[in-house]
Image: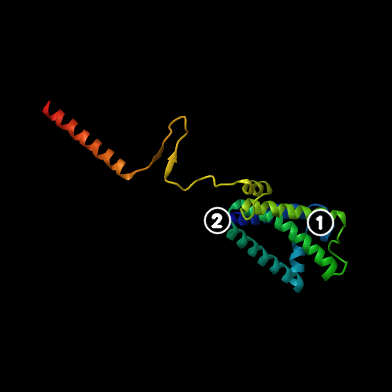
């Protein structure tokens, strides 16, 4: 949260005192033949109700996006957040362009379906999110699935008996709590004998 707040403060400071004054003096197609005129933008914002609603919507969606990123990092990890952001935003923009072209604006804006190029783009998104699910541990890669099916027995046996290699021993050794307690008693008796011998000396 602190990092995001610092980013906002630094970006606001840089835009107000460096970026906007510079681009206001560069030649362009905006008001007064400048690249971007801040006074003209503020005037349009004051006089246009639709522009104010669009600006408020942008702020609300930006807040919602940052809150969702914080929740994703807290529940999953920062790597999941990066993968979802890098794949989710382009997919959302592409679907929005398709909806604008075919549903909302009826061909006046947006992006149409471009045949083979759109199929390649769709395959790229599917492959991307398939890799994301593998990274998140939700599904297994094909090689791991085949390997698990070929295993006839578990790798770790739930058995208290430890079997050593035949070259070391032909017998199986079993852990026994009584043996360990007996060894500890013998070691304590040996320590007492040493202490008594030192005292006698």
Residue lying at the far left of the rendered structure: 200
Q: Earlier in the sequence, mark 2 or mark 1?
A: 2
Residue 77, percent from left and from top: 58, 53
Quarter of the rendering containing residue 182: top left
Residue lying at the far front of the rendered structure: 170
Residue 103, percent from left and from top: 83, 70
Residue lying at the far bottom of the rendered structure: 49
Q: Is residue 34 left or right of residue 7?
A: right
The residue singled out by tag 2 in the image is: 2
| Mark 2: few/some/many CA within 10 Å (<14, 14-19, 20+) | few
Pick the quarter of the image with the N terminus: bottom right
Residue 158 appears in view: yes
At a point 72% along the width and 58% down the height, the residue shown is 89
From the viewer's perspective, is residue 173 above or below residue 121? above
Quarter of the rendering containing residue 177: top left
* Marks 2 & 1, CB-CB < 8 Å contact: no
The residue singled out by tag 1 in the image is: 34
| Mark 1: few/some/many CA within 10 Å (<14, 14-19, 20+) | some
């Amino acid at each position: 949260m602190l990092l995001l707040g610092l980013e906002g403060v630094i970006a606001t400071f840089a835009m107000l005192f460096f970026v906007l004054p510079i681009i206001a003096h560069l030649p362009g197609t905006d008001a007064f033949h400048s690249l971007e005129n801040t006074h003209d933008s503020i005037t349009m914002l004051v006089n246009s109700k639709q522009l104010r609603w669009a600006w408020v919507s942008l702020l609300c969606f930006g807040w919602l996006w940052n809150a969702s990123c914080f929740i994703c990092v807290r529940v999953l990890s920062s790597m999941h957040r990066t993968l979802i952001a890098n794949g989710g935003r382009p997919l959302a923009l592409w679907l929005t362009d398709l909806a604008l072209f075919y549903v909302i604006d009826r061909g006046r804006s947006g992006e149409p379906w471009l045949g083979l190029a759109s199929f390649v783009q769709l395959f790229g998104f599917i492959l991307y999110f398939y890799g994301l699910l593998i990274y998140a541990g939700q599904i297994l890669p094909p090689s791991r699935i085949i390997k698990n099916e070929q295993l006839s027995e578990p790798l770790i046996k739930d058995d208290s008996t430890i079997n050593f290699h035949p070259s070391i021993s032909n017998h199986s050794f079993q852990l026994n709590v009584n043996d360990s307690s007996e060894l500890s008693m013998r070691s304590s008796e040996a320590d007492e004998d040493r202490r008594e011998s030192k005292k006698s000396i």
